[in-house]
Amino acid sequence: MGPLAGTRVVELASLAPGAFGAMILADLGADVLRVDRKSRNRGLDLPTGVLDRGRSTISLDLKDSTDLATLHRIIESADVFVEGFRPGVAERLGLGPDDLLERNPRLVYTRMTGWGQQGSLAPRAGHDINYLAVAGVLEPIGPKGHRPVPPLNLVADLGGGGMLMALGVLAALLERQSSGQGQVVDAAMVDGSSLLMTFIHGMRDVGLWSNGRGENMFDSGAPFYDTYECADGRFVAVGAVETEFYDQLVATLGWDSPPPQYDFSRWPELRDRLAGTFKQRTRDEWASIFADVDACVAPVLTPVEAPEHPHNAARAAFVQVGDSRQPAPAPRFSRTPADPPQPLNTLDAKEMLDSWTVELP
C-alpha cells in the first residue's frame, strides 16, 4: 500500500543521503531492492538497522560479469535506479546512464552525490559539514561570538540530499507519464543545502538579515526566539515572533512593564530577564504552565523523550520497526496510506524479484 505501490526501485547501497532517500520511497510504498556488495572495504559502514527499513536486499559483486549481468536484468524491470558513487565510477562499472537508459529508456536514473557531477569539487570527497560550508549554510549557524555549529547531519545529508533526491525522483516519474521517457536526476547535497537557504537570502535582500552570526531573528539573535535553561538544567524553546505571541509570553510569565519586543537596544535586557525567569521552575513545570497558551513555548525534548510526548503519541508519530522505535513515515495520505515500515530482515528479495518477473541465476 502507499501512493508509490507498484513502483520498482533499485538502490546501490551507499551512505546516509542515498539510503535516506530510498527509505522515503520505501515508506511511500515503493518496492525497493537494495544491492549490497558481496565484499566491502570501507572505513565506515553504518550498522544494520540504520535507514534500511522497507527494503529487500541482494548481494552482488559489481566487478563480476555474471553478477553485473544479473543486475542489468533487474534494472531492465525497474522504474528507478539510485547510485551514490563519485562521478565516473558508475560508468567504469558499466552502470552509467548511457548503459542503463539504453536498456531501459523509461528508467529514472538517480545520482546522489555531495558536489554534483560537474564543478571543480566534483571528484573530491566530502561530508555534510563540507557541503554546508561551501553552500554558505554553516557560517550563519551558531551563537554570537562563537564558531559556526554543525546542525547534526540534517541539512546536507538528509534534507538537501536524500529528501530532495526523493522529490527529484517523484518529479521525474510524474513527467514520465506524459513523455514516456526516463531521465537522469542529478541530486547534489551542496545544491540542496543552498536551496534550503532561499528564505535567508530573501531576508538579507530586504534588509532583515545581517552578516553577523547570532544577530538575527532565527539564529538566536532575537531573545524571543531562543532556548532557555530551567531550574533542572533542561531547556524550553521560545518562538514568540509575532506580537500577539510575545504578549501572551510576557503575560503568562507575570511580568510588569515588559521591554518592547522590537526595541533592539533593549534585547540584552530582555534576554537576561527571560533567562532569569525560566531558571525559576523546571522544564516540565513550564511546559504545564504554557500547555494551553498560544505563546509558542515548548519543552526541549531528547530523542528518547519525544515518542512519549502526548501530541506525538496521539498522532502515532513514532512506530516500532523490529526492535527499534523510529519516526513514522511522512507525510500522510487519506486514500493510499503507507503500510507500517518493516525491518530489512523480514523481506524476501527473491519474492520481490519474482513479482518483477526477474529470475536469479
Image (cartoon, rainbow, N blue to C red):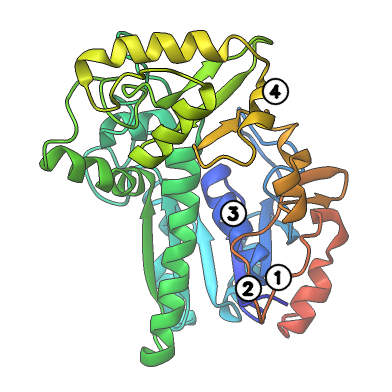
Residue furthest left as drawn: 206
Residue that numbered label 3 is attached to:
63
Residue that numbered label 2 is attached to:
333
Check disc 1 and give the amino acid type: Ala
Residue furthest front as drawn: 256
Q: Earlier in the sequence, mark 1 or mark 2?
A: 2
Q: Secondary structure at mark 4?
A: helix
74 relative to 296, above or below: below
Residue that numbered label 1 is attached to:
338
Check disc 4 and give the amino acid type: Glu
Q: Earlier in the sequence, mark 2 or mark 4?
A: 4
Q: Earlier in the sequence, mark 3 or mark 1?
A: 3
**Front of the two marks 4 and 3:** 4
From where the camera sits, is residue 189 visible? yes
Q: Residues within 10 Å of mark 1 (few under 14, many from 20)?
A: many
Labels 1 and 2 touching (C-beta < 8 A):
yes
Labels 2 and 4 touching (C-beta < 8 A):
no
